[in-house]
Amino acid sequence: MPEPKVKRVLIAGATGYLGKYAVKAFNERGYWVRVLTRSKERLFEPGPFTAPALEAEDIDDIFVGEIAQPDTLAGLMDGIDIVYSSVGISRQRDGLTFEQVDYQCNRNLMDLCQSSNVNQFVYVSMQGADNIMDLAITQAHERVVSDLRQSGLNYRIVRPCGYFSDMGVLYDMAAKGRSFLVGPGHNKMNPIHGRDLAEVCVDTAEGDEVEVEAGGPDIMTQREAAEMAFEVAGKPIKITVIPMWLARGLVKLIALLSTQFGDLANFIVTAGEIDGVGPKRGTTTLKHYFESLHAANSKNR
């Protein structure tokens, strides 16, 4: 019998925290991997919060282009079976909005899929979107989801309960001796490690579930996570709570100065109010993740 055809996947967002793990996960499952990037150099640099540097053997083809400029993407979808996208704003650098990046860049990919032979689009959105639809980031993500549902494409949506990379900020503050929480930190969560989430993404691409929520193995409050960070860092617990009334006032002030940073600040503050708990699909604990950050921090001293 002839060997089954090796599936070819395009990874968009390959230089980000989750994207680097996704490249490795698809490669390890036997996929032929093309990555879309603005910078070849960034592919082979370590990612944020211990995300791995990619190796040449992880990637079969590098396509250099600008996702916000479709005229640079001619040929991107040639031979591709699956498009995977975790494209979105993780840190504000370019002054762009969630609408411009999280929505329009993914819409550009979708348009290219519809004029090609791509079989499937796997998109990483967010868990609990229905409860935070007033946020610009949620509106952008859910517009992508809505467009996919109407596109006629075979699609899959992965909804993580937050990333460990976001929790890395808690360790960084603890290592410096003081942590700041927006609100009392009683909201519950179970964020997931990027490596575990990447495996969920590949499983979802290969499975029948159209929308999949994914959380880590530990459910805890934000305050408990902050206290754990101090424990791992070997520092006494010093937590300063920023009252919600003050945080909301600061968001309004920031929004007057910059719409982009105001939207990001609004998301951060809202995350301090709501629960984010989903199915326990990850296996890496948050404490283990903090320990890996501590080891890296100690090594770099």
Image (spheres, helix red, strand yellow):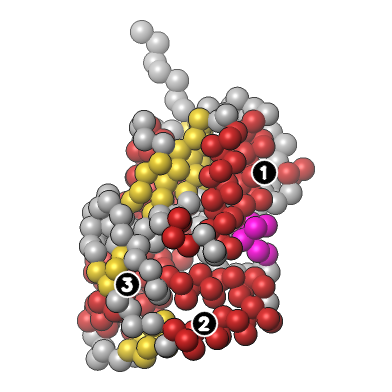
Residue 160: x %, y % from top left? 39, 54
**Is 289 on the left-hand or right-hand side of 21?**
left
Whether residue 97 appears in magenta in the rendering, the answer is: yes
Q: Counting residues from the N terminus, which is met first, the one under dot 1 or under dot 2?
A: 1
The answer to if 257 sits in the magenta stretch is no
Residue picked out by circle 2: 248
Looking at the rendered image, the disc whose residue lies closer to the viewer, 1 or 2, is: 2
Dot 3 or dot 2, earlier in sequence = 3
Q: Residues within 10 Å of mark 1 (few under 14, many from 20)?
A: some
Residue 213 visible in the displayed image? yes
Secondary structure state at the residue bearing disc 3: loop
215 or 59, which is in the foreground?
215
The residue pinned by badge 3 equals 187
Residue 212 is situated, as x and y percent measured from the top left of the image, at 37, 44
- Closer to the chain start, of discs 3 and 1, is 1
Alpha carbons under labels 1 and 2: distance apart: 34 Å
The image shows residue 46, relative to residue 290, as above or below, that is above
Is 253 displayed left or right of 9 in the figure? right
Q: Which residues are magenta?
A: 96-101
Residue labelled with disc 1: 108
Q: Amino acid at mark 2?
A: Arg
